[in-house]
Amino acid sequence: MFQNFKPEIKLFLLVVAFIAVVVSVAGILVLQKSISRENPLSVLPVMRLEHQGKTYDGVQGSYCWPVPVSEKAGGAICVDKLFPQSSETITVRQGDELVLSIDAAKPPQTLTASTLAYPDQPPGKTFSLGSELTQSFQIDHPVDTYFLLLFGTWEEGDISYGFKIDVQPQQVSTPVDTSGPAPNSSTPLVINSMEGWQTYSNGEFGFEVNYPANLMIIEPRGYAGIVSPKYTSCEEGTILVQEINITFVPREGKSYKDIWETTFTFPFEEGYYDGSELIGGKKAYYTFLGSGILERKVYLVPQSHNRALQIDVHTRKGLSECESNFLSTDLVVDFIDQILATFRFAPTTN
């Protein structure tokens, strides 16, 4: 790599490289001495979450924390980890509270929480927490599985911990006719008839869709959904699933292409999306996100030049392995298609 330099420049570069190596080795020796048994690393803060009486240990992420200062050595250890992955999942319902406890000598100066949809979606929320060693906070997110990163700072340094959160729908539903079979009945629904179906209208998002009374409407902040009231026995780790789970999320941007690329963080080009279908009379492109039981088919339906509606259909490929009490597994996909066939846009109220 030095063949194009003059001899005197080559010599200079070699001397600089040698000095750099000597300094690096000396630094390593000093660092090793500073964290020897006679001068151990300071105790790092530890973060844990509690939900419904069970405690979950976080996975330690990036940190920068001091080595105790002595007469001969001092400094800090800094470690970078992009996403500390947790194999244990905390299953919560929308609006549930999580209790955070921090094992540290003193409270943090600042504490923030960030979430992103697991495992490959852009950040969903970043919010500040209090500075107490024990505190609670709410999970108010759309139904999905999230990576939760807690990041605390102290005068001495900072540290982060990662958790895996599976958010399930609230138990808030529209009135269900109790004169017929209960929603948890083991009798499969007859899907070749729309008799008794109801109409859900959302003036804020500007759409309507028909659905059977056996299903529930959920309306957390920022999106709406149609879900089945009965959880199946499907599990992947500790992740519970529902047979029917369709969510509607409004999106805005400069154009359809801009909305797509902001929503999915990959180009709106052939080879990136998986196909297109007509929904509400509009050509809607779609892509598949996640995998296994967590896989979902996501449509982006154009609404106007700068608005679109994201429709997430949780396909739950693992349902064929499950014991179902609501719908026969082979009918689930057809049933979802029949619901989406009734979708239409309507005037917004805002």
Image: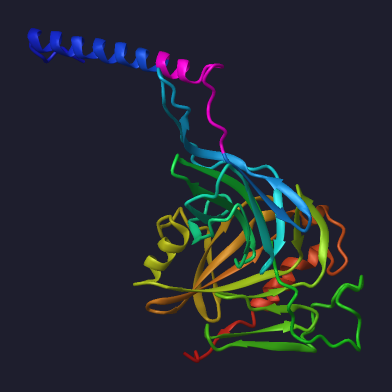
Above or below for 297 versus 347: above
Rendered image quadrant of residue 231: bottom right
316 vs 67, nearest the viewer: 67
Rendered image quadrant of residue 88: top right
* Residue beneath the point at 50% across and 78% down: 282
139 vs 177, nearest the viewer: 139
Specify whether 181 is left or right of 218. Answer: right
Above or below for 223 versus 57: below
Residue 54 in percent (x, y) is at 77, 52
Q: Quadrant of the N terminus?
A: top left
297 vs 54, nearest the viewer: 54
Residue range highlighted in magenta: 29-44
Above or below for 346 versus 100: below
| Residue 76 magenta-highlighted | no
Residue 347 in percent (x, y) is at 50, 91
Residue 157 in percent (x, y) is at 45, 40
Judged by its main secondary structure, the magenta piece is loop
Residue 125 seen in this snapshot: no
Specify whether 215 is left or right of 120. Answer: right
Rendered image quadrant of residue 87: top right
